[in-house]
Amino acid sequence: NAGVMQNPRHLVRRRGQEARLRCSPMKGHSHVYWYRQLPEEGLKFMVYLQKENIIDESGMPKERFSAEFPKEGPSILRIQQVVRGDSAAYFCASSPKDRGANTIYFGEGSWLTVV
Amino acid sequence: QKEVEQDPGPLSVPEGAIVSLNCTYSNSAFQYFMWYRQYSRKGPELLMYTYSSGNKEDGRFTAQVDKSSKYISLFIRDSQPSDSATYLCAMSVIQGAQKLVFGQGTRLTINP
């Protein structure tokens, strides 16, 4: 009974490179959420997706960040031209339907370090 | 001013003590309140979920919501070393799982 799977767990990128973080939701879940946790801060909502559809991206930075959840395959959070301030833990969560926060399950996170 | 304020601690108590964790918030539209436990380098795990004001108990954990004061609490009775973790409060306006607003988290250590 696999939970929310994120990879890579740890990623190191040089400034200016691209980072791609992947998330496979729990079996039977069709909704995916990405949250970012900066050092010593709580999680902050970034984007909410369903298959082939971005529902709410109000938490995404306007530039360099994008997310997708294709019909086949995992959801991907892409960060282009990374900067030191992008260093953070990125958590993906999924839910079966948008029925409530008590149905959401978080993955173990992807830790991005920009050097 | 942050929408949700939470004392980051760290908080250290002896095993068996009652632990009280708190959050205050400024947005009176919040209706759904959650507490998550997060172990080091792991994802958050939902502990308690409550709607509107009142108390909810689950084993050693009790969650309280006081909407009039915009204040929520999590109590842990008979604390165990395995309870050592960071505890995050979260809340939302709508029932949906998107746009949860999290507190900073309180780092808790239970000493044997």
Image (cartoon, grey):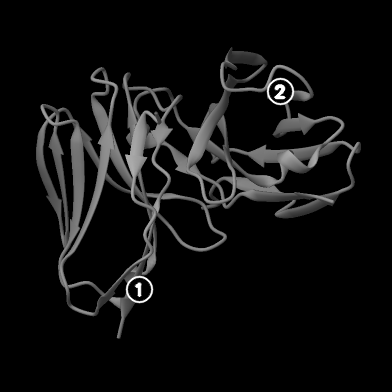
Say which residue appears at 16% left-offset and 60% top-offset.
B59
Instruction: Give the answer, above or below, for where B73 lies relative to A30.
Output: below
Residue B57's x, y, as percent? 12, 51
| Residue with the mark numbered 2 | A68
Give the residue displayed 33% in from the left and 36% down from the top: A102
Front in this rendered view, residue A22 or A18:
A18
Residue B93: x and y in percent read 31, 20
Q: Chain of mark 2?
A: A
Is residue A15 toward the left or the right of residue B9 in the image?
Answer: right
Residue A21 as seen in the image, left or right of residue B12: right
CB atoms of marks 2 and 1 within 8 Å: no
Tally of numbered tags: 2
Check disc 1 and give the amino acid type. Ser
Q: Residue at x 78, y 32 (%)?
A: A79
- Mark 1, Cα crowd under 10 Å, few <14 / some 14-19 / many 20+, is few
Quadrant of the snapshot with the N terminus of chain B: top left
- Furthest-bottom residue in view? B112
Residue denoted by label 1: B82
